[in-house]
Each structure stands twice: as C-alpha cells, then as structure tokens.
C-alpha cells in the first residue's frame, strides 16, 4: 500500500486483526446491507446504519454536526481515536462514512482494504454480539465543505467548463437506459448524465477480492478518461455514496488535490426542471 | 465467537437481472445474501441450517423483489 498518495488511510486485514483490542482503535462496520452486521462482524466492531445514522432523516442532507458528535460519543470514539472503517461490497459505505468524518474533521480515519468481503474470505473471527463501548464526549470541527459539491457548484462548473465531472454509475445508468439499478427505490424523472461527464464506474477501482487496485492501474483508469490531478474534479452517482468511494480513491489513493463529492447526484439532477441532460454513452 | 467458513460468491440471473449470491457459515447457521451485481445493493437475505436452505430462502425472496 506504500505507493498510494496517502497510504496511511488504508490498513490491511492483518493489521486490524492485530489491533482489534487496541483501546485507541475503534473498528466500525458500515454496510450497504444494514442487516449484515447482525449476522457476524469483527469482534469489538461497532455497527453504523447508513440509512438512519449517517444522514439527516428529516431533510435530505448528510448527518448534522450535533448528530455526528452524538454518534461518535455513543460509539466510544474520542477526537484522538483511530477509526477503522470497513463494510460490504468493496467498502462502498465505509467510504461514505469516511467522507462525512473528513467533512467534520476527524484526523485519523482509515479504511480496511478489502472490507468485509476479504475478512470473510480469509475465514477470520466473527461475532454476532453487539459491541457496547463506554460513551465519550466528541467535539467536531467546523465542516470542511471543500470536499462536498452542492448543485450550484456543479452548475457553475458546467457553465465555466473548468471541472472534470466523473459519473461513477453503471454504463446503463449513465446512458439513460436505466433510471436506477434493479431492485432499488430511489429514482429520478429523467435518465442520462450531466453533459460532459466521464463515465468511470466506481467498482473499477477494486480488485475481485475487494481491495483497491495498485496506484498505476488507478491512474490509468482516470487518465484514459481525461481525469487528471490538475483539474477540479466533481464525482457523482445516484445518491452520493458510490461517488464517495471514487472521491476516496481520487483524493487519498491518487492524491489529487481538488476533488469533491456531489451527494445530490443524479436523484437531484435528474429531477430538476430545466437542467441539461445528455443521453447515450 | 467463531470463524467465518465456507465463504462463497456465485453469479446468476434472477428475473433477467444479474445478481451475486454470497453465502457463508458462522457457527451452526448459514447466511445468504442476494445483491444486484451492479452496484451490489442487497435484494434479499436469509439464513438456514444448510447453505442450500439459506440460498433457497434468499433467492425466493429475491424473485419477488426483482
């Protein structure tokens, strides 16, 4: 993992196994499948539910500062704790949690390379006992909104033509053939993509075992589509979570300086009246 | 506490949708999850005393969902 720009944001399954009882380390599982934690998790790991705990459940927004402070405090996490995130499906929602923790300034947060899939495939220890950490008090930093793109910024970037838009959804969603992946409820009025966006599906960044691809392969994936470090990059998907994974890859593994995640994504853009939409590949 | 065992992923089509079916054993139970192949969101999950039971139950739920 040494070649990554910020290799310290990744840990191996071996590292987690060795540190799972370290009192300065909090292991947190965040899955797309919110029932997975209950069916076996790393001993000592806390489970966060992305649908209820990592968002504002009333208005559409990320978690508020106050709610995150409460969540971290109740999870026994202090400002100096090393947080290790992992989850199913190539760490999809672990990256979503990582992005929000960085918005609120948590210093030491890392992702377990390979996530839940690799841990299970290696026949490692699991428990179904929920963790019950002693509560702490956590104080967040003021939000760093430079890593978050709102609709207005996307519109401005589109007008100015000075940003690289990266649509990380599947080719069929990008082209407009599909409004949403099969079996999912969140959808939109129009299919297609933001004009000028490059289609680089998020999972291209991962190997079959769930780990991230080597840095030279990742660079090539993005360079081939014109997404380079000198540009302001805005990643988006359908509701902003797949794109948080690509945001992590671009910012922390490749070290691109100006990368933001448009979490409004296609469920916002594809519902806007009068917003420009491009169809086809 | 025990170790995950017999972890297995297979790809299949259900109602013409490409899915990944993941199953493993933990203690006396088998767990099975059916997810769409892309992006990998869970469609259904189930558990059973054998892999076959868990898979059949999860696939049966997935057929209704998709």
Image (cartoon, coloured by chain):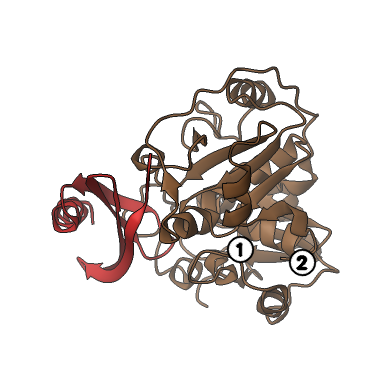
The tag earlier along the polypeptide, 2 or 1, is: 2
Say if mark 2 contacts mark 1, CB within 8 Å. no
Task: Write down the quadrant of residue A56 in the picture.
Answer: top right
Q: Residue at x 36, y 47 (%)?
A: A185
Dot 2 corresponds to which residue? A2
Q: Is residue A56 above or below residue A222?
A: above
Of all chains in the rendering, the one displayed in red is B
Chain under numbered label 1: A
Chain under numbered label 2: A
Q: Is residue A198 above or below residue A83?
A: below
Task: Write down the quadrant of residue A159 in the picture.
Answer: bottom right
| Of residues A19 and A215, the one drawn nearer to the viewer in this rendering | A19
Picture disc at residue A280? none
Mark 2 residue element: loop
Q: Residue at x 50, y 38 (%)?
A: A50
Residue A113 x/y as whole percent: 60, 58
- For this view, does A257 lie left or right of residue B15? right
Dot 1 corresponds to which residue? A194
Residue A187 appears in view? yes
| Of residues A61 and A223, the one drawn nearer to the viewer in this rendering | A223
- For this view, does B3 lie left or right of residue A235? left
Of all chains in the rendering, the one displayed in brown is A
Mark 1 residue element: loop
Residue A279 x/y as whole percent: 51, 71
- For the residues labelled 2 and 1, the Cα–Cα distance comes to 35 Å
Residue A3 x/y as whole percent: 77, 70
- For this view, does A55 lie left or right of residue A218? left
Q: Residue at x 38, y 39 (%)?
A: B1
């Amino acid at each position: 993992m040494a070649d990554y720009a910020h290799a310290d944001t990744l840990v191996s399954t071996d590292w987690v196994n060795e540190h799972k009882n370290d009192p300065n380390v909090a292991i947190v599982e965040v899955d797309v499948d919110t029932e997975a934690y209950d069916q076996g998790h790393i001993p000592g790991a806390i489970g966060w539910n992305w649908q209820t705990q990592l968002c504002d459940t009333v208005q559409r927004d990320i978690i508020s500062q106050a709610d995150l402070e409460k969540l971290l405090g109740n999870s026994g996490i202090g400002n100096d704790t090393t947080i290790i995130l992992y989850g199913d499906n190539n760490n999809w929602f672990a990256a979503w949690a990582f992005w929000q923790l960085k918005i609120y300034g948590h210093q030491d947060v890392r992702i377990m390379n390979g996530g839940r899939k690799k841990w299970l495939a290696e026949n490692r220890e699991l428990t179904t006992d929920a963790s019950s950490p002693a509560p702490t008090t956590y104080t967040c930093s003021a939000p760093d909104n430079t890593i978050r793109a709102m609709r207005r910024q996307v519109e401005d970037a589109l007008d100015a033509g000075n940003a690289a838009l990266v649509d990380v959804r599947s080719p069929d969603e990008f082209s407009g053939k599909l409004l949403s992946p099969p079996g999912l409820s969140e959808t939109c009025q129009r299919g297609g993509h933001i004009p000028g966006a490059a289609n680089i599906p998020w999972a291209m960044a991962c190997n079959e075992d769930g780990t991230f691809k080597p840095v030279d392969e990742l660079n090539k994936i993005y360079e081939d589509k014109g997404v380079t470090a000198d540009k302001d990059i805005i990643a988006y998907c359908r509701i902003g979570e797949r794109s948080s994974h690509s945001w992590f890859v671009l910012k922390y593994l490749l070290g691109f300086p100006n990368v933001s995640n448009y979490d409004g994504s296609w469920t916002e853009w594809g519902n806007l009246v009068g917003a420009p939409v491009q169809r086809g590949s | 506490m025990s170790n995950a065992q017999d972890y297995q992923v297979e790809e299949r089509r259900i109602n013409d949708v490409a899915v990944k079916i993941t199953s493993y054993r933990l203690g006396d139970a088998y767990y099975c999850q059916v997810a769409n192949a892309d992006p990998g969101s869970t469609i259904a999950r189930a558990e059973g005393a054998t892999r076959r039971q868990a898979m059949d139950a999860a696939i049966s739920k997935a057929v209704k969902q998709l």
